[in-house]
Structure formats: structure tokens, C-alpha cells
Amino acid sequence: MKKILAILLAVFLFALVRVGLKNAEKMQWYTAGVSLRYEEPLQSDVVHDAHKQNASLTFWCQQEDILEIENKQIHATIFLYNGDMAMVWGQPLKIGSIPSPFDESGCVLSSGAAYALFGSENVVGLFLKQGNTTYVVRGIFESNDLLAILPVSTAAFTAVEIPYTEALWQDPDTQVTMLSQETGLPTPQWQLYPKEIFAIMQWTLYIPILFSGIVLLSLFAHTIKGWPVIYRDGLVFLILLLLILALPFFFQVWPQWLTPSRWSDFSWWRQVLSQLKNHFYAWLSIIPSYRDVCIKTIVLCHLSIIAGQCILCEWLRCGLQKIE
């Protein structure tokens, strides 16, 4: 009976890992770049000059407005953007395709907005109006909320998306500061790094693997305890050597700004902790958009999944001990 219970706990743990991976995939939709946020809308000349200096920047804002067709209108949450729509809303489309960065008339709707406005999801190619501007629907994404993503040339933009590059990932704060100076953008009130959250979510999903490794290591240590000293020490040395050889590959993907030049450099640790605190505080203090609420919902779901994993791991450990 105890063995069956342990097997069931292991199956539940595996299922929870799968759920966590699916939840982390949702977070990946929002990790295309670093997001700079402003309390006051950016001036149109600032936006124009910045875009001229760096065409990869995407400007956007959120507002509540009316969408209409000939005989119907709805009140929806609208994202207005100038640049690449994928930087603002990376969720995969259910129908159609995202407009290209040069498509000034193509828009994307949520399935909820499509049903409310047209009575169907199959509306790709149909027209709608927002204010005095007419758009053609290019794609539909899954959401019951009334959402629309529309390209514009000018608007009260309060957010800037900077696409991730290797240099930006390795030293984000420095690269953002340099890019702001080069493009003439003012200092943002908040800087958001969704990819950091995604990386943490991925790493924490390996808690069951770490737990299994600790249990196996404990069993392994118990097994070799009675070996002759020369064989036992030789095996331990070989394992440590393999770990040392693997470190260069680990630090190739590990962000440079989280790699100390000297482990004993306490000023470096204080600086990194200050950066992480500022990044965390930005998520708490920001004036949230619908997009930010989606990210925070995903993170809260992930925290509950991790808590469930920890509980199952502890139950499984206790069950294995009873079996022994």
C-alpha cells in the first residue's frame, strides 16, 4: 500500500511539473523585450526621433475606447502601438496572422471582442472602426475579454519595448541606459524585465529534479560508505572533476551581470541585490496595464504550483522513508 501511495505521489508530482511547464510557456509570450514605462505620455517628437535612431523600438499605450462596425459598437480595452505588435502582445493567434511592422491598417482582436462585435470568430478580412480610423482584422487570439491591438502613427505612448539581444541579457541596466541616451528617451519611471521572471520560473520548475538528486545522492553516499577508501575517494574526485568541467558551459548561459568578478567582493553583491530589489519593486509599484495583470496572474499561478511541488516532494520523501 505504501509503495502504491509513493507511486501515486510521484505521478501527481510529474503532472504538476507538466502544468508548471505549460504555465511558464504563457510567460514566454511576454519576454520579447525590456519594457520602459512612463507616468506621462512621451512627446511625439521624442517618439519620432527615438524611432529614427533605433527602428527596433516599439511604442505602445493602453486605453478604453469604442470599436464599431456599421450597426454595432462595443467598449473595449485597446492597445495602440507603433512598431512590432509581437513586442506588445506575443500570445499566439487562434486564427490569422499578426500584422507586419509596416502594416498600418491591420489589427488583431480577442475572440471575445470578435464575438461581441461580429458574432463570430471567423472575421479575418472584415473591417472595423476606432474613432475616424478604419482597420482590417488580420487575426484573432483566445481571450474572453474585449481586447483589440491597433497600429497608430502617433498616440499618448507611455511604454517602450526594447527587443532582447545577447548584450541586453548579459548587462540589462547598463544597456538600457546606453540605449536611452543614444535615442534621446527620457529616464523611465519603471523598467520591467519579464525575461528575468521567466528564467526564475524555469529554474524553480527543476525543484523536483533537485529533490530527486538529493535523495539519490544520500542513497549513493550511504552505499559507498563501506567501500575501500581509495575507491571511494577516487569516485568522489571524479564526480567533483566533472562538475568543475561543466561550470564553463553553465556560465556561458548564465547572465554576466549575475557573475561576480570575485566571490569575496561584497560591494558587488550589494550592487546586484540593489538591482534585483529595484527590478522587483518596479513590478509592485507600476501602474498596471492589462498586459501586466496577465503577467502577475501567471506568476501567482506559478507560485501555487511550486508550493504544491514542495508539498508533494515532502510527502514523497516521507513515504520513501517508511518504505525503507
Image (cartoon, helix red, strand yellow):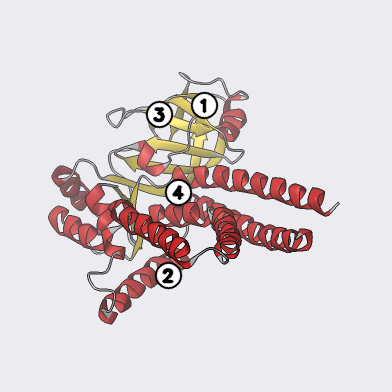
Marks 1/3: CA–CA distance = 21 Å
Amino acid found under the numbered disc labelled 1: Ile
Which numbered disc, 1 or 3, marks the residue closer to the eye?
A: 3
Marks 4/1: CA–CA distance = 19 Å
The residue under label 3 is 98
* Relative to 238, 179 lies left or right: left
Question: Element type at marker 2?
Answer: helix
Q: Which residue occupies 22% across, 52% down?
A: 167
Point out the tag, 2 or 4, that comes first from the N-terminus. Answer: 4
Q: How many marks?
A: 4
Which numbered disc, 4 or 1, marks the residue closer to the eye?
A: 4
The residue under label 1 is 69
Point out the tag, 2 or 3, that comes first from the N-terminus. Answer: 3
Where the C terminus falls, by quadrant?
A: bottom right
Marks 4/3: CA–CA distance = 20 Å
Marks 2/4: CA–CA distance = 24 Å
The residue under label 4 is 63
The residue under label 2 is 281
118 versus 74 height, above or below: above
Amino acid found under the numbered disc labelled 3: Ile
Point out the tag, 2 or 1, that comes first from the N-terminus. Answer: 1
Q: Position of residue 78 (x, y in %)?
A: 46, 42
Which numbered disc, 2 or 4, marks the residue closer to the eye?
A: 2
* Relative to 214, 42 lies left or right: left
